[in-house]
Amino acid sequence: MEIGVDIDEVAVGFVEKYLEYYNDKNNTWFGLDDIFSYKLWEVFGGTKQESVKSVENFYKSDFFDEIKPLDGAVDAVRELRSLHRISFVTARPEIFMEKTEKCISKYFGKEIPIVYVGSYYGGKSKGEIGFDLSLDIMLEDNYEYALSCVEKCITTYLFDKPWNARFNGVPNLFRVKDWNEISEILLRENNELNIVG
């Protein structure tokens, strides 16, 4: 199978580190549960441009360099990679490619390709890129990106996060709570394919 793995909040923690940065810069106390939308201007107030600039500044900061993998991600990706073809598929801006690749190679190795969607600023959707990559499965945390994958007939697993909690009931879009759960599902599917095949 071809599996796409989002980077931020699927492979590595992004939001908690960003909140540390944001709170430090703005003398605020936002927590993970306050992030009800990835449209951060809806959460913090201000404009979309101000939110985009804040995230860009975060990418340039030492806070960003301290991002770590989510619990279970490294082992699960390693195990899945032994059975399937894995690609990281990210909406991160390509201007931060060097930092992105440094982080990914540090924890996941250099062998897994990273595909930059470009949808952070506009461009092809993750679903369109996933279709171009012939993905069978996408692991995602952003509901809008997940929907774009489902629309292209890519089975998508949505990691439970506060910003996607209000969305449910879409065929071929399945919620998972963590890497342990998704590993069990995908390893079970792999075993079932081997039995049938």
Image (cartoon, helix red, strand yellow):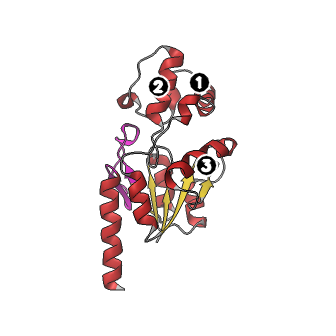
Q: Tell me the number on the disc at residue 82.
A: none
Q: Residue 63: percent from the left, percent from the top?
A: 53, 30
Mark 1: amino acid: Thr
Residue at mark 2 to residue at mark 3: CA–CA distance: 22 Å
Residue with the mark numbered 1: 47
Q: Residue at x 50, y 60 (%)?
A: 4
The tag earlier along the polypeptide, 2 or 3, is 2
Label 1 sits on a secondary structure element that is loop
Residue with the mark numbered 2: 20
Label 2 sits on a secondary structure element that is helix
Taking the image as shown, residue 169 lies to the left or right of residue 88, namely left
Which residues lie in the magenta part?
158-178
Q: Residue 145: percent from the left, percent from the top?
A: 50, 50
Front tag of 2 and 3: 3
- In the rendered view, would you say 79 is above or below 16? below
Residue at mark 1 to residue at mark 3: CA–CA distance: 30 Å
Residue with the mark numbered 3: 101
The tag earlier along the polypeptide, 1 or 3, is 1
Q: Residue at x 57, y 62 (%)?
A: 111
Query: Quick check: marks 2 and 3 in contact, CB under 8 Å?
Result: no
